[in-house]
Image (cartoon, rainbow, N blue to C red):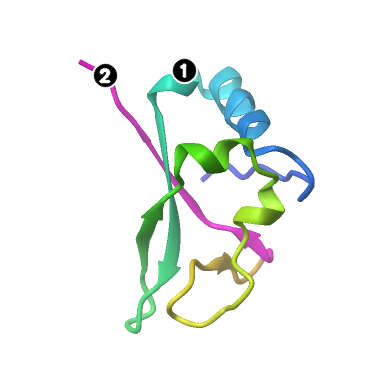
């Protein structure tokens, strides 16, 4: 699985543009979700990242609490786990 390392000060929209360039998925077709750990040690999508959050810095999207009610950071890297879905608008 590809990993992207970005500073917390990076705007999420800048990250989206980089993904669009590297993977060929246009920004308008990207759908992002935060992930969280489940009690059975698997990961599940938690909530979508809202359009209003795209203009925020990555640090504003990062969870501040590691409880099971919050999105999960990658335990090995200390990073944010995200799910990207690509869609074609009708």
Give the quarter of the figure containing the C terminus: top left
Q: Is residue 79 magenta?
A: yes
Q: Give the label, 2 or 1, closer to the camera.
A: 2
SS assignment at label 1: loop
71 relative to 66, above or below: above
Q: Picture coordinates of residue 20 (x, y %)?
A: 54, 22
Q: Residue at x 30, y 26 (%)?
A: 87
Q: CA distance from mark 2 to mark 1?
A: 11 Å
74 relative to 52, above or below: below
Mark 2: few/some/many CA within 10 Å (<14, 14-19, 20+)? few
Q: Picture coordinates of residue 9 (x, y %)?
A: 79, 46
Mark 1: few/some/many CA within 10 Å (<14, 14-19, 20+)? some
Q: Nearer the viewer, residue 56 or 3?
A: 56
Q: Nearer the viewer, residue 59 or 7?
A: 59
The label shown at residue 89 is: 2
Magenta residues?
77-90
Q: Quadrant of residue 73?
A: bottom right
Q: What residue did someone put label 1 on? A: 26
């Amino acid at each position: 699985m590809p990993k992207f390392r970005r500073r917390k000060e990076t705007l999420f929209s800048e990250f989206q543009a980089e993904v669009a360039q590297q993977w060929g998925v246009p920004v308008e077709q990207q759908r992002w979700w935060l992930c969280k750990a489940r009690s059975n040690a698997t990961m599940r999508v938690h909530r979508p990242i809202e359009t209003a959050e795209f203009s925020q810095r990555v640090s504003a999207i990062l969870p501040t609490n590691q409880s099971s009610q919050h999105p999960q950071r990658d335990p090995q890297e200390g990073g944010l786990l995200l799910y990207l879905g690509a869609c074609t608008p009708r």
